[in-house]
Amino acid sequence: MQYKISESTTANAVARSNLQGVNGYGGMQLFANDAYSHYHSLQTTLSRRWGAGYFQAAYTFSKALDATSTGNTAFNTAFNDESNISNSYGLSDFDRSHRFTVSYRYDLPFFSHGTGLAHHALGNWALSGITTAQSGTPFSVLDATAGSAYVANGLAFETLGATLAPGKTIASGQTSGDIHRRLDGYLDVNNFTTAPHADSAGCALDPKNACTTGFGNLRRNLYRGPFQQNWDFSLVKNFLVRERQQLRFTADFFNIWNHANFASPAIAQQDINNPQFAKITSTAGNPRLIQLSLRYAF
């Protein structure tokens, strides 16, 4: 849906900010329930149970698309031209193309029956865990200098798309290789450029006042962050104290391999004008955490 409040051209960029009835205000916002979304997926599950435990695997191949992934005002979330919500349509901020999860539990059969020290020390142990592998989430390539010809007050830079450099494609902006070697340049900065002048002829005649910029040609959420994986593991031991009393020892290992899952470049690093463009400086999730617990049931 498009709301046309006034004709939007470079010739009347200043004049149209003083709309009839709202003179003296720096801008205006329009609230409407007009965002939309679509979700498509293939979901599969494989499970098996037996006396000593269970195994379950689930895989989802999906695509989530929307015009906004939050409930904020369009001024804060609409991409490029905020008067046309369709310009914001793209991959959802939370979209993950692939997600594979395995969960399992196995009661170890060793010394599970009998008496004596071996039974009490080595019997009644169980292993369990959850393993997850998934695609990274989408992010945009931004240009904080774009759109100055169309908005008197300026837009939040996180809603302004950058422009592909001549001869470049979306795919050519993605670097390749081991993620640890790409942390200082997840995307190729030379693949992008700043927004063109909205009025090139006027800019040449009046560089001080007429060199405003149009919007970039890159849409929202065209790139995806690094692949992620996580392994959680638990070791459980049950002690039968008496007929109706039981002591359970549990050792939980979250992210047992202490594997670093890298996040997408932060918002500031998504701006092509930032010297730190496309640099990954944070991780998703936590480092290895070991949790020990005792539970007495009666």
Image (spheres, grey):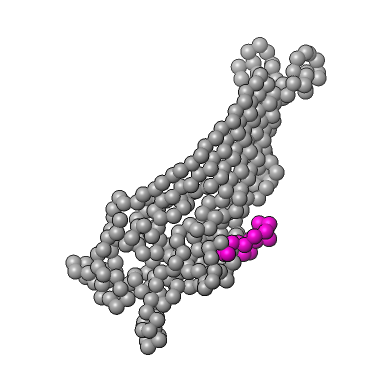
- The residue at 56%/55% (across/down) is 225
Q: Which portion, as a residue range, is magenta?
A: 172-186
Q: Is residue 111 visible?
A: yes
Tell me where residue 282 appears, x and y as whole percent. 59, 56
Q: Quadrant of the N terminus?
A: bottom left
- The residue at 38%/76% (across/down) is 198
- The residue at 52%/73% (across/down) is 166
All told, the count of numbered labels is 0
Tell me where residue 63 appears, x and y as whole percent. 48, 47
Closer to the camera in the image, 268 or 81:
81
Residue situated furthest bottom in the rendering: 205
Residue situated furthest left in the rendering: 21
Q: Is residue 3 above or below residue 45?
A: below
- The residue at 73%/24% (across/down) is 108
Tell me where residue 297 appears, x and y as whole percent. 61, 20
Q: Is residue 142 above or below residue 100?
A: below
Q: Name the magenta segment's main secondary structure.
A: loop
Q: Is residue 208 visible?
A: no
Horizontal placement of 146 versus 121: left or right? Answer: left
- Residue 25 on the magenta span: no
Closer to the camera in the image, 248 or 268:
268
Residue 79 lies in quadrant: bottom left
Q: Is residue 26 above or below residue 266?
A: below
Residue 20 lies in quadrant: bottom left
Tell me where residue 211 appears, x and y as whole percent. 39, 80
